[in-house]
């Protein structure tokens, strides 16, 4: 059942090329240069008239929502707010009939997300679900939706659900960009082509496993860890930190790289590993100067860079290369080595990777 893998988590990490492909299959039609999603098409008016999109979710799904915020605003020019479902539902939020709420949930059973949906519906908002589990409570409670088609996710730590959520949300953003005219047809075509290349790039990237394992071996006794990223990869830093916390029980924090000097830099010494996402198209020079700041305080740098990088290689203690891609799609790649790093550290620390202590796969109580 684990398909030859030692844990479900590792199996699910390796399933991502297939899962991402299944997510866009039948929806991304490159030859015709269209994106076909019934749930979006049938409700196009709601999306086009939306004053804003409010994304509600918890945990890893909330991180996927943050990535989507950057993508929606860039591609479709619709203002997006991303909310923890648990905060949103108790805040007496301002919601109108011209708001579109997107609820993201792997299980489709998360109590807070479900309650947020009910609240938004009671205020007249149109609610769209992005779920993995077919027929789940959230899938039934929303007005329309799109499934991620990742297949069952058994490991408690979410992996393929995250990358497929980002894929679905990217498809929606691209579809709306065309409908709104915020993206030219040539740029749209280019993105369709680039998105179709992602699964094979993930496949290629998964070969870094042994290299990541070597890095994991050197940091398995760490007690703290910092994750930094900017732009599209800021949410990936948060997700990387969450993954390490939940399965290895090492304290970790994710930060937007530029926020480091507003506090967390005080934590840096020679026992602090700092994982920095420094892709070539994403505010690269600025991130490089953050890396220099960390290095001059003796922090240990594990950098995720684009193939062919030279500047970061000179300073970092370790580099993990990802294939070149459009920056907007880079979270689908940069996430992969961070999942592997957490996995290997947790295994080396003898943690129960698939069922970490105190956690449940779906949080059906608040
Ligand atoms: C982290 C993790 C949790 C879930 C969160 C939301 O790896 O699994 O943070 O992402 O409980 O769950 P869903 O997506 O099922 O609503």
Image (tube, helix red, strand yellow):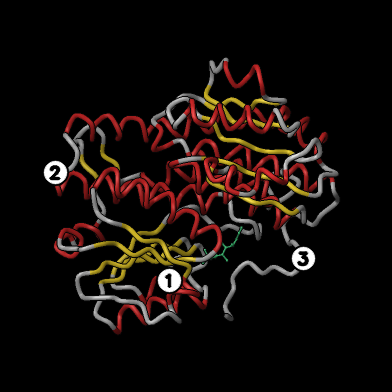
CB at mark 2 closer than 8 A to ligand 1?
Answer: no
Say which residue appears at 23% left-offset and 35% top-offset.
188
In three-dimensional space, the C-alpha distance between marks 3 and 1, rounded to whole angstroms, equals 28 Å
Res. 357 mark: 3
> Callout 1: helix, strand or loop?
loop
Name the residue beneath numbered marker 2: 181
Q: Would you say 145 lies left or right of 4 here?
A: left
- Seen from the viewer's position, the closer of residues 305 and 133 is 305
Would you call the spot at circle 3 few (<14 residues within 10 Å), some (14-19), or many (20 or more)? few
> Where does residue 107 sit, x and y in percent of width and height?
52, 67
Res. 135 mark: 1
> Where does residue 176 sit, x and y in percent of width and height?
22, 50
> Callout 3: helix, strand or loop?
loop
> Where does residue 319 sit, x and y in percent of width and height?
65, 25
- Seen from the viewer's position, the closer of residues 22 and 66 is 66
In three-dimensional space, the C-alpha distance between marks 2 and 3, rounded to whole angstroms, equals 48 Å
Q: Mark 2, mark 3: which one is toward the viewer? A: 2
Say which residue appears at 15% left-offset and 48% top-offset.
179
């Amino acid at each position: 059942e684990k398909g030859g893998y030692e844990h479900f988590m590792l199996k699910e990490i390796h399933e991502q090329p297939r899962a991402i492909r299944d997510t866009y299959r039948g929806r991304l039609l490159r030859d015709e240069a269209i994106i076909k999603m019934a749930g979006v098409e049938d409700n196009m008016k709601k999306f086009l008239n939306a004053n804003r999109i409010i994304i509600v979710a918890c945990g890893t799904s909330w991180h996927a929502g943050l990535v989507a915020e950057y993508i929606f605003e860039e591609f479709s020019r619709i203002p997006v707010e991303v909310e923890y479902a648990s905060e949103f539902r108790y805040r007496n939020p301002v919601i109108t009939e011209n708001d579109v709420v997107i609820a993201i949930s792997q299980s489709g059973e998360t109590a807070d997300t479900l309650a947020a949906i009910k609240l938004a519906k009671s205020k007249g908002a149109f609610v769209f679900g992005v779920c993995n589990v077919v027929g789940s409570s959230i899938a039934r409670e929303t007005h329309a939706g799109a499934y991620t088609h990742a297949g069952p996710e058994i490991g408690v730590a979410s992996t393929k659900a995250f990358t497929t959520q980002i894929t679905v949300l990217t498809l929606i953003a691209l579809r709306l960009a065309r409908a709104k005219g915020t993206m030219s047809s040539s740029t749209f075509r280019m993105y369709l082509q680039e998105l179709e290349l992602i699964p094979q790039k993930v496949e290629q990237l998964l070969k870094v496993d042994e290299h990541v394992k070597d890095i994991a071996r050197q940091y398995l006794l760490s007690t703290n860890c910092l994750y930094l990223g900017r732009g599209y990869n800021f949410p990936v830093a948060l997700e990387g930190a969450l993954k390490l916390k939940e399965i290895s029980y090492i304290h970790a924090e994710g930060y937007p790289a530029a926020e480091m000097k507003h506090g967390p830099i005080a934590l840096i010494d020679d026992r602090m590993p700092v994982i920095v996402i420094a892709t070539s198209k994403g505010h690269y020079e600025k991130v490089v100067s953050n890396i220099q700041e960390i290095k001059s305080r003796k922090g240990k740098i594990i950098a995720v860079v684009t193939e062919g990088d030279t500047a970061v290689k000179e300073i970092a203690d370790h580099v993990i290369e990802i294939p070149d891609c459009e920056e907007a799609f880079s979270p689908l790649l940069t996430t992969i080595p961070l999942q592997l790093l957490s996995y290997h550290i947790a295994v080396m620390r003898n943690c129960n990777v698939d069922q970490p202590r105190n956690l449940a796969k779906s949080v059906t109580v608040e």
